[in-house]
Image: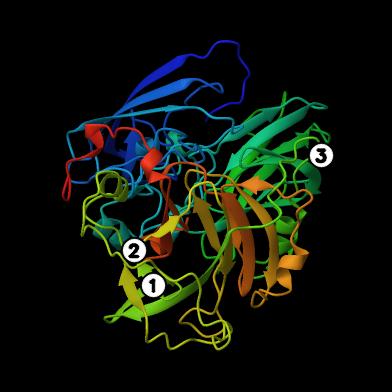
Amino acid sequence: MLGNLYTAEARVRHYKWEVKYEYKSPDCFKKLVITINGRTPGPTIQAQEGDTVIVEVTNNLGTENLAIHWHGIRQIGTPWSDGTEGVTQCPVLPGDTFKYQFVVDRSTYEQATGLSSNPFVWVGEPQSLLINGKGRFNCSTITSSSLSSIGGVCNTSNPECSPYVQTVIPGKTYRLRIGSLTGLSALSFQIEGHNMTVVEADGHFVEPFVVKNLFIYSGETYSVLVKANQDPSRNYWITSNVVARNRTTPPGLATFNYYPNHPKRSPPTSPPTPPAWDDAEPRVAQSLAIKARRGYIKKAPTTSDRVIVFLNTQNTINGFRHWSVNNVSFSLPHTPYLIALKHKLKNTFHSTPPPDGYDFANYDIFSVANNTNATSSNGIYRLKFNTTVDIILQNANTMTKNNSETHPWHLHGHDFWVLGYGKGKFDKDNDPKKYNLENPIMKNTVPLHPFGWTALRFRANNPGVWAFHCHIESHFYMGMGVVFEEGIDRVGKLPSSIMGCGRT
């Protein structure tokens, strides 16, 4: 976690990390997880704005490559430290050590580590929601034969999976910093009996508004204020629940502990009922409520130089299901773009850029499309440096009838203005007239709601090559992403440590 603590003198913060597999029981079910220095979640980086952070990462995963992305850090002047394999660097091979070095910019704070895989999601094995790395799987639902077949051990008495406890003093107000590190699901976060006042999102101050449930999407971060103003003789539940997809995973549970009650004393009530998983209205309402705080508004440019519309679809290519943007499923080249472009290496990726839009007039976003023209490509978007770019994210029906999924989109290297949300198909003639140009919030991750659109605006003013993708792991892996290049001629000399793959 990186803090915005003002200081007169910048410092160098030096860390050494070892990444490896270890057996852990974060939800009482023993399994292999990815650890950093033996911990999961990994260690905290304490830093102030202007500090230089150096992290030497040793990959001891044995058989897997590694890269670490510093989510929300814009990497101004250090695009090679963005930690995006295939885009800004070659992977860190097993047994190798790689040095990330960057200056902490003015973002308030971020959950800044993002490994190339999520240690808490297993297909076909027990899945749990964790709060600060702790959860509790219902071991009684697993038969002995199932445990034997997957080689696991489930033990609810293991102290490693004791629920997280947040202790508070009655009458005091607390700032909670909440980040979603999920690999798949959107979440609803709730503290039983307490309102939360949202004051910050993705490092930018928000005009305060009150919620009972905070909807949070993969890659997002928020700050909320909570006052310990309820009956102090008892403890309360902290819960997280899946929303935006059919809820089969049990809730994540933690304890809001009123001092001096015992921290392990369970609340006397059942956990609060979560919002309906398929009710998008309150989620859209929260998105619309997030505005920049008065006194901290950074005005967006009133017009843009280029508009790119990204249709979010599923496709079948060569018999396999893909996620796609404008019917193009993204794939990574063997030579990272940053190196290929800076060193002018030819024939390393497709020279034809992906399309700036789709068949607006004839495409029915509410029906399962044929999408016979779907292709796979590693082509990229070349943006003129220092221009203003609008991105319209357009959702549509998947390959399943009457289904449109929620997609949290994350942009590397930038913060963007969120200009608006809408239902149905984006109207290029009328919807831009409704953009919020008075107090739009700036973010780096934003949801695209089912059968709707989201409009963003950013300045292409950070020299480098930057990924823009759905933050759901499987969606990005299956092709829901793009890459932007801007000002590559302004990028400094590339360190040799990022090379060693493809034509490098």
In contact (CB < 8 Å): disc 3 and disc 1? no
Q: Is residue 261 left or right of residue 366?
A: right
* N-terminal-most mark, 3 or 2: 3
Three-letter code for the amino acid on which mark 3 is drawn: Arg
Q: As shown in the figure, which amino acid type bears the numbered disc 2?
A: Gly
Q: How is colour applied across the structure in the image?
A: rainbow
Q: Are marks 2 and 1 in contact (CB under 8 Å)?
A: yes
Q: CA distance from mark 3 to mark 2?
A: 41 Å
User: Quick one: label 2, few (<14), some, or many (20+) residues within 10 Å?
Assistant: many
Residue bearing mark 2: 379
Of label 2 and label 1, which has the lower sequence position? 1
Helix, strand or loop under label 2: loop
Image: 34 above or below 14? below
Secondary structure beneath dot 3 equals loop
Q: Amino acid at mark 1?
A: Val
Mark 2 to mark 1 CA distance (whole Å) = 10 Å
Give the mark toward the camera: 3 or 2.
Answer: 2
Residue that mark 3 sits on: 294
Please tell me whether residue 99 is drawn above or below residue 384 in the rendered image.
Answer: above
Dividing the picture into quarters, in which one does residue 170 lie? Answer: top right
Residue 21 vertical placement versus 430 (above, below): above
Question: Residue 331, how many percent across, how many down?
Answer: 31, 63
User: Which quarter shows the C terminus?
Assistant: top left
**Residue visible at 20% across and 60% down in the picture:** 347
| Badge 1: residue crowd in 10 Å (few <14, some 14–19, many ≥20) | many
Mark closest to the chain's N terminus, 3 or 1:
3
Q: Position of residue 436 (x, y in %)?
A: 76, 57
Residue 317 in percent (x, y) is at: 31, 79
Of helix, strand and loop, which one carries label 1? Answer: strand
Residue 242 visible: no
Q: Which residue is mark 1?
A: 328
